Image (cartoon, helix red, strand yellow):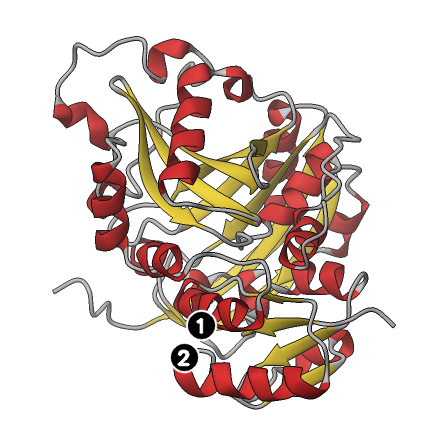
Amino acid sequence: MAQPVVLLGAGRRDSCDEFPLARIAAVRPVVLVDPDPPAWTRPYLAGHLTADPAREAPTTEAVLAYAAGHPVAGVLTWSRAHLTTAARITARLGLPGLPYETAAACADPVALRTLLHRSRLPTTGPRDEGDTPDAGNTGDARNTGESRNTGEARDGEGPLVSAETVVLDDEVRIVALTRTTPGPPPARSPLRHHVHAHDGLLHNRFLRTCVERTARALALTHTVAHITLRLTARGPRVLAVAPHLPGDLIPLLVERATGVDLATAAAALATGDQPDLTPTRQRAAAVQFAYPTVTGRLTHLHLDPAAEHDPSADHILLTRHPGDPVTAAPHADVTDRLARWVATGEDPTACEEALRRLARHLTVTVAPTPDVHAA
C-alpha cells in the first residue's frame, strides 16, 4: 500500500474542497489532521489525527509522533492559515515543502508585498482586489506591459487573472489562467471563474516573466501555486500568492479545459514525484456562483431537474437550504452562496451562454430582514 499524505485541514465542502480531496484520495491514502473531521470527508480518508492545524507546535508534534510509526510520503494543505505548520512539519521530516520563511510571507499579505518589493516586483494593494475587470482586449500586450505612460491610478483597474502554476526544481510552468469576475463592492466575492486552454495571455511575455520572477522571489519549489495578478496599463501587478491548490472549483475547471489534474500534481510534488502536466484537452470551462439579492431568511430554493440535461452542464449543486439566514451580494461571502454550476464548451463564449441558460433553472425566495449594513 502506498504511503499516505497528511492533509492539514479539510477546508469546507461549500468552498469546493471536496473535488481535490477526492482526486488525491484516488492516488494516495490521506490522513486528515483536524479537530473534528467533517462528515463529507470520511469516505476519502485512510486515517485521522485529532489536532488543530492552526496550532503550529502541538500539531507538528502530533504529526511527528504519527510518522514515527507510520511512514508519511508528504504533507499538504490548501489553507493559508496552515502554511507555516506544513512548512515546519516538512522541514522536521525532511519532506518536500516550502521554506518556513516563504510560508510565513505567503500567509501574511503585508509581509508578502514587502518581500516582493525587495525583488522589484510590482504589486497592487488589497483595496483593489475586487475592482470590476475590464472586458476589453485582455489578451493584447497593451494591457500587460507595452503601455507605461499612465499613472498609478490605473493600477486599481483592469482584469483579474490568476496563473495556475506548477513549480518544479528549476522550472516555473503556467498550466492555465483563471479569469475572475468579482461581485459588487464592498465584499466583491467572486461571481464566476473562467479557464480557457487557448487563453491569449498564456503567450504574453510580460505576464509569464512576472509569474516566474514572483515564484523565484518567494523561493517557491515543489508546489502548485495560485498567483493572482491584476492587468494594468503599467503591466501586470501581483495581488496575491497562494502556494497551494486554489479553491472555488478552479482545479476542476483546469482539468475540464486542459486535462491537467492539479490535485494529483500537488500530491506528486508533496511526495517528491514528478507530476504529469501533459495537456489532453483544448476546451473552456467556467463556474458561476449564485448569491442572494436580498438579506434575510431563505424560504425557497429550487433547481429545475431539466438543468442536468443541458449538454454543457458539468456540475450543479445547491449549497444552502430553506431556513438558512443569507446576506445579499454586496456584503456576501462564500458561506452565502446559494448554488454553483459548472459549464464546459469549445470556447469562453459557449461557456458564458451555458452559464446563463443554467441560471434560468434556479428559483430563489428570501424573506427580507432589515439590512444591518444600510446604516
Q: What residue type is labelled 1?
A: Thr
Mark 2 in CB contact with mark 1 (< 8 angstroms) = yes
- Circle 2 SS class: helix
Above or below 345: residue 58: below
SS of the residue under disc 1: helix
Instruction: Give the labeled residue for mark 1.
Output: 85
When asked about the image quadrant of residue 99, the answer is: bottom left
Looking at the image, residue 294 lies above or below residue 184: below
Q: Quadrant of the N terminus?
A: bottom right
Q: Which residue does the image show at 54% across and 65% down from the upper left? A: 77
Q: Quadrant of residue 123?
A: top left
User: Where residue 293 appears, x then y in whole percent?
Assistant: 39, 56
Near mark 1 (Cα within 10 A), the count class, few <14, some 14-19 or many ≥20, is many
Gap between marks 2 and 1 measured at Cα: 5 Å
Give residue 61's position: percent from left, percent from top: 50, 86
Q: Name the residue under label 2.
A: 56
Is 340 on the left or on the right of 60, as rendered? right
Q: Is residue 15 above or below residue 189?
A: below
Residue drawn 54% across the image and 16% down it: 203
Say whether disc 2 or disc 1 marks the residue closer to the N-terminus.
2
